[in-house]
Image (cartoon, rainbow, N blue to C red):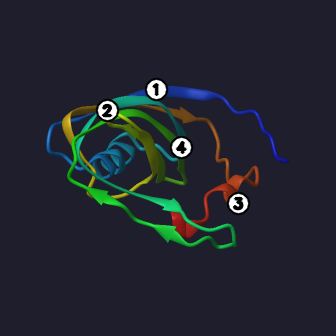
Amino acid sequence: MISRETTMKRVVLVRIAPGEDILLGLRQAVVDHSISNGLFLTGFGSASQSHFHVVMSNELPPKESYPKSIQPLDICSFNGYVLDGKVHCHIDFSDERNGFGGHLEEGTLALTFANIAIGEIEDSVRIAGWDTIADEQDL
């Protein structure tokens, strides 16, 4: 187990407009605001199409699936990290019956909007040894 304290520097609010790619927008916000390390604190909105990936096996490294859909969906939450300027974001969706989600991929487009809050932290979580939670290939 690894734990470490850090300090929140500021919160950056991001609004992704209709039709924009959410992951590309988050990456641009990280660049525009020079965020090296941060946390996705909260987020919500809707998507006109989705693309994410999920694990599909128990072995390491796990097999993965990359579902895509053009079904309109509510976005219930965003979570994850910005590590050394790289976005590692997970997203939760819902339709009228189910909730589901995974690692956000390019191709998830905002329907009405996507609002996300990024909390910038003082220092690198990689220094604390947290790099094991976000493998380089997964960023």
Residue 51 location in percent, x, y?
33, 56
Query: Which label lies toward us, 1 or 2?
Result: 2
How far apart marks 3 and 2 lie (CA) works out to 36 Å
Q: Nearer the viewer, residue 83 or 93?
A: 93
Q: Amino acid at mark 1?
A: Val
Secondary element under disc 3, as helix, strand or loop, is helix
Label 4 sits on residue: 80
- Vertical order, 47 against 51 (above or below): above
How far apart marks 1 and 4 lie (CA) works out to 15 Å
Secondary element under disc 1, as helix, strand or loop, is strand
Q: Are marks 3 and 2 in contact (CB under 8 Å)?
A: no
Label 3 sits on residue: 132
| Mark 1: few/some/many CA within 10 Å (<14, 14-19, 20+) | some
Q: Which mark is residue 96?
A: 2
Q: Which mark is residue 28?
A: none
* Upstream in sequence: badge 1 or badge 4: 1
How far apart marks 2 and 4 lie (CA) works out to 25 Å
